Image: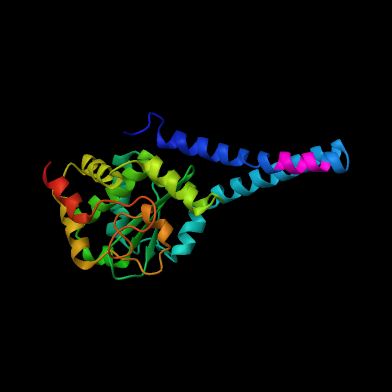
Amino acid sequence: MQPVRTLEDQTERLVRNTMLLGLVPGVVLGAVAALLVHPLVGLVVLVVVAGAWAALVWSRVGSAVAATVDRLGATHLAAGGEPRLENLIESVSVVGGIEEPQVRVLSVPTLNAAAVADRSGATFVVTRGLLDGLGRVELEAVLANLAGRVKAGNARFVTTVLALPLPAGTRDNLLTRGLGEQATVRADLAAVGLTRYPPGLIAALGVMEQHGTAVKGAPPETAPLWLAPIDGFGRVGAGSEESLALRIAVLQEL
C-alpha cells in the first residue's frame, strides 16, 4: 500500500531529517570538547559539525541532477538537432503538467531512457538507440512515461536518495519503501493515461525488449531512474522492477 504522504512530501522530509543527523556527532563531539576544554568551545564544535553536515547534504541535493547526468556521460541536445523529439517533449510536458525538461542523449545503441529531477526541474536522458529505433507514437509513449515519473515525484525522490551521503544499504531501503511495489507498472499506467493509447507503450516496450535495454557504463545504483533494466537482465540493487514482458501483459489487459 502506498503511504498517504506523497513522494514530494517524503523527499522534503527526508532531506530535512538527513540534515538533522549532523546533530548526533555534533552533540557527542561538543560534549567532549565542553568537558575537556570549555563549555563555549563545546557549543562551537556542535554548531560547526552540525552545520558542516547540513551544508554537505544541501550541496549534494542541490547538485544531484547535474552530478547524476554527468556520471552517465550523456551530451546536451543541440537546439533543432532532433526536431521530432523536441516537439514530442514539448507536447508531453504540456499534457503532463510539468515544466519542459532538459534533454541529454547517450550514445549507446540500446533502447532506454531515464528521468532525473529535483525541485527546480527535470532532465530526460535518452539513448541514441531509442531515438533511432522507435517511431513517433512509440517515442511519445516513452516520454509520457518519463513525464509521469516527474509529475508523481518518483524521479525527484530517487535522484535525491541517490545523492544523500548515506550508506548504500540505507539508500536501498529508502528506495524500496518510498517507491513501493510495482513502481514501473504504475508509471506505465500513468503514461497511457496521458497518451490515451496503450498500444503505443506496448509497442515501445516490445521493441526495447527485442533489441536490448542495457546501458553500458551506467552506475548500477541509477537503475530506478531508468524506464527499463540497465544490466541487460533485470534491475540491479534496490527497486527491482517487473520484467518488460509482465509490463506488456498488464497493458494488454487494458
Who's the residue at 49% across and 44% down the image?
A: 120
- Specify the principal SS of the magenta part: helix
Residue 13: x and y, percent? 51, 35
At which x and y percent is residue 216?
Answer: 37, 69
Q: Which residue is drawn at 32% across and 52% down?
A: 240
- Where is residue 203, by image quadrant? bottom left
- On the rendered image, what quadrant is the C terminus found in? top left
Q: Which of 101 and 78 is in front in this view?
A: 101
The stretch drawn in magenta includes residue 31 = yes
Which residues are drawn in magenta?
26-33
Q: Is residue 209 left or right of residue 44?
A: left
- Quarter of the picture containing the N terminus is top left
Residue at the (77%, 41%) spot, across then down? 30
> Is 76 placed above or below 53 here?
below
Q: Is residue 153 left or right of residue 91?
A: right
Can residue 233 be seen in this snapshot?
yes
Q: Residue at x 50, y 56 (%)?
A: 66
Q: Which quarter of the figure has residue 244?
A: bottom left
Q: Where is residue 107 in the image (x, y as percent from the top left)?
A: 36, 70
Please, which residue is most extreme toward the right here? Answer: 37
The residue furthest left is 253
Q: Is 50 covered by the magenta stretch? A: no
Could you say which is closer to the camera, residue 87 or residue 208?
208
Coloring applied to the structure: rainbow
